[in-house]
Image (tube, coloured by chain):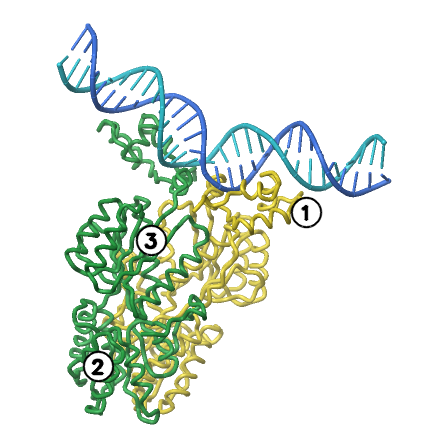
Chain colours: A green, B yellow, C blue, D cyan
Amino acid sequence: MLRTPTLSDVAKRAGVSYATADRVVNARGGVAERSRAKVQAAIESLGYVRNIAAANLSQQRVYRFGFVLPAGENAFFDHMRQLIRYRVATIPASQVEVQVFDVDAFNVQALCTELHGLRGQDFDGLAVVGIDHPDVAHALGALRESGVAVVTLVSDVQAPALAGYVGVDNFAAGRTAGRLIGMAQAANFGTVQIILGSHVLRDHAERLAGAQFVLARDFPHVTVLSPLAGLDQGPLVESLLAERLLLHPEITAIYGLGAGNNGIIRTMAARLPTLPRPFCVLHELTTDTRHAIEAGLVDAVIDQQPEQEIDRAFALMRHAADRMPLQNTGLITPAIFLRDNLPSATHIPHDERPDHD
Amino acid sequence: MLRTPTLSDVAKRAGVSYATADRVVNARGGVAERSRAKVQAAIESLGYVRNIAAANLSQQRVYRFGFVLPAGENAFFDHMRQLIRYRVATIPASQVEVQVFDVDAFNVQALCTELHGLRGQDFDGLAVVGIDHPDVAHALGALRESGVAVVTLVSDVQAPALAGYVGVDNFAAGRTAGRLIGMAQAANFGTVQIILGSHVLRDHAERLAGAQFVLARDFPHVTVLSPLAGLDQGPLVESLLAERLLLHPEITAIYGLGAGNNGIIRTMAARLPTLPRPFCVLHELTTDTRHAIEAGLVDAVIDQQPEQEIDRAFALMRHAADRMPLQNTGLITPAIFLRDNLPSATHIPHDERPDHD
DNA sequence: ATTTTTTTGATAGACGTCTTTCATTTTCTT
DNA sequence: AAGAAAATGAAAGACGTCTATCAAAAAAAT
């Protein structure tokens, strides 16, 4: 059990000076191919790994990371902002600097402007909730070329050579919701009402497909009504759903697969408590849905686990900033929360819980 | 946005020499109370935080951590061993050395002997799957006093001043299982068979209580048969359960709350596939239960998320080793896995998957 | 063969902390 | 007040890496 090898050891083993070895590992150029190969070989034979702590110390390096999130009345991203703040606060003095940028939601133009503005601001990494659009891909590419490690978050963007994507498996999320609903209908017949958010988002489409797939294959006795499009607007969802429930009293389950959750929650709250309530599955554990589940207005929440997403985003950005080989993480597995396994919400201070959609 | 303060800054601010400030932060003694107070004040007013990377560098510190796990044919702890190995392998050259010790399961004497042997071996931290017994508590106390950060894992031990406990909320896990079962029986009447592991373990008792609590309160139409005691032995569970199912064809749900899972799985596999299968909930996602769920023999698995437990154990040990104020983490929330949200098992190499109980 | 260019070596200082040593000052004893 | 004990200061070297500079050697071009 000897000391871990240092760059000096590498240099010695390669038969070159420390300076040359350094030129190789830091890609400074001006090294003959022959020497480069020798150093490489020495690195491998010794299993040398750069001591990042020492490197950072020598440079007084401070990691600069940024998050670019959609602004606006959205419970999920509000929650995510909280979680980021909390995460940063708990990292103790770790030479990490984090900024969060809010961009007009689903506005390609605004997003690209922001991204261009961020270039040359010397960020080590950026985690971006993207819109899958060529212009956005182009802006992200430009950032990457200016040396920023770019991670797409929640929603992927088709762009080359990003440091990674962190997001949930939405098809699996939809399947999970479908199975929960199917289970709750037991062998019985039931009728499901699905509420869409906006049609345009790919993640919603994937969830829908997942739910429909499982319901059709494993629960053929369950009827699936044509989905309602709530356009992510709580009040609209509320009125549409109330109307639907009047017209179709046979509805035994409701699946809300996007934003506009609070419309569903309000509809449930408005029902006579004596009537049997439809089995109700929503997405994303936020203050709203948590309260709804605690109050018995909703049965289950499928969650994309933003804490995990944030952790992974940091890990990816940091990895890239440290010039480490990037590890493929795979999609995040959706979590199921019932009334009984709600995580405690220690990370949200009492005086700043958002209460809009 | 200035440089983060160093100990030299603290010394200057306190009006003492670097040496004195150092004597204070490293508790070397030989410092007058007056000076100590001045340094403390300076630390607080500047918000000084020791640069751990630099400290470790100067000492060539290598963290030595150990895990003490019960040996024997136990799918869950086999899985945990895998996860630890995987975790260690993915931490890149991080000056962390990890050893895993196997101890005869549920043998207080053996555990204490091992723990005493570990003292003086200069560990920075130990994560111990404990048995709640005064002798074990005493052994852990001795370790702590010899300067080891002791974390209890999975099963807590009543001992003072440990660095923390990492484990799942077993009552919540039981409640969650109970609710899943209740949901799957819908408004209908159903009959639940519970299979215990050993009676002695507190975690099993808590799960049982949780399930019974939720079933009684929220699903009064569901009948709960008297639990079977399988003593954690697969074959015994299998024969007892098969017999029970013959005697009670009205059983519509099975809840296995401990080890001996493979007995339940084999019983399910042996049934005529044409017959409707009871709704089946087990604990701990291992190779066995994963296969069972994929094969449609089991409906849900409640998991204590050992990856998270390992991460937290490392975090706690490391925190204590770095002399940072310990943060209370709270219990882990049990996860629900259905067929549709199984996490990918990338961490388990194909050629070493255990297949016993 | 000489000049130019490229490649290499040697070395020194910095980052923030820990450890150790030795000299000096202050405080306490009696 | 003198001696003993306690407290403090000053400084240097180490940890592994980065950056920079300058001289020397080797290779390429003319």
Vertically, is B312 above or below B235? above
Q: Chain of mark 3?
A: A
Identify the amino acid type marked 1: Arg
Crowding at dot 3, Cα within 10 Å, few <14 / some 14-19 / many 20+, comes out as: some
Residue at label 3? A315
Label 3 – label 2 distance at C-alpha: 48 Å
Find residue B272 and name its label. Answer: 2
Q: Is residue A12 visible?
A: no
- Callout in the foreground (3, 1): 1
Mark 1 — on which chain does it sit?
Answer: B
- The chain carrying label 2 is B
Q: Would residue A111 appear left or right of A274 to someone viewing this image?
A: left
> What secondary structure is found at the residue carrying circle 3?
helix
Residue A230 drawn above or below residue B216: above
Q: Are marks 3 and 1 in contact (CB under 8 Å)?
A: no
Question: Disc 2 or 1, which lies upstream in sequence?
Answer: 1
- Mark 3–mark 2 contact, CB under 8 Å? no
Same chain letter for marks 3 and 2: no
In this rendering, which labeled residue sits more in front, label 3 or label 2?
3
Q: Pointer 2 and pointer 1: residues touching (CB < 8 Å)?
A: no
Residue C5 place in picture, x, y as percent = 20, 21
- Secondary structure beneath dot 1 equals helix
Tag shown at residue B34: 1
In the figure, is residue B250 to the left or right of A131?
right
Residue A136 image offset from top left, x and y in percent: 19, 56
**Nearer to the camera, B184 or B136:** B184
Have a look at marks 2 and 1 and say if they share a chain.
yes
Q: Horizontal and vertical percent for residue B102?
A: 44, 57
Q: Position of residue B261 (x, y in %)?
A: 34, 72
Residue name at image x 34 percent, y 29 percent:
A11
Up-down: is B12 above or below A335? above
